[in-house]
Image (cartoon, rainbow, N blue to C red):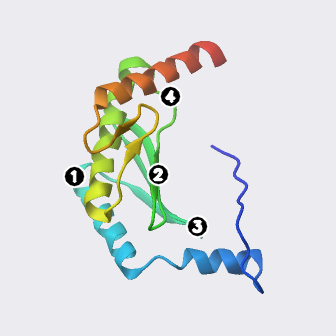
Amino acid sequence: MTYDIMFLRVLPGRTFDETLEEISSTLTVEQRADWDRLLQRISREVGPVTTEEFPYSLTLWRDGPGGHLQLDYDGDSANIDIPYRYPDSEALPITAEAYRIGRMIEEECGLEGYDHEVEQPVRTGDIDVAAARLGGIARWAQETLT
């Protein structure tokens, strides 16, 4: 869980909440259709998901046998987050699922994915390399921080 503080350029003549409502409603009909198509595809090809709509993004949570991930989408960008709780080889299933979903995002929403942790594009990236990075950091965190 994170403690989030939001920053936003308040539109002239509007309150913070009015600005937040206005910018959150800027999802185009096409972007909303992309999201709906993506949800259907992930549910069909990967498994059940939970979704919620926030003022600033649409969010999906996937809790499957491979682990947990979160996808945030705002129409012009998306982000997949995986918690650092999968040490070593335990990281491979959730990383593979994240890359699979990432490729669906690219296909359904027209966005391009890049994994900055290992400096590789999602479309052609090596899942084993990404899983090794996630698993190594998780192992380090468990050994060092607990």
Distance between mark 3 and mark 1 Cα atoms: 27 Å
Position of residue 91 measured from the top left corner of the image (x, y, whole percent): 38, 27
Q: Which residue is mark 2?
A: 79
Position of residue 63 measured from the top left corner of the image (x, y, whole percent): 40, 44
Which tag is nearer the camera, tag 3 or tag 4? 3
Q: Which residue is mark 3?
A: 56
Front position in the image: 142 or 113: 113
Q: Secondary structure at mark 4?
A: loop
Dividing the picture into quadrants, the one containing residue 77 is bottom left
Earlier sequence position, callout 4 versus callout 2: 2
- Residue at left 58%, top 67%? 56
Residue type, mark 1 in image: Glu
Q: Secondary structure at mark 1?
A: helix
- Above or below for 121 versus 88: below
Distance between mark 3 and mark 4 Cα atoms: 27 Å
Q: Residues within 10 Å of mark 2 (few under 14, many from 20)?
A: some
Q: Which residue is mark 4?
A: 85
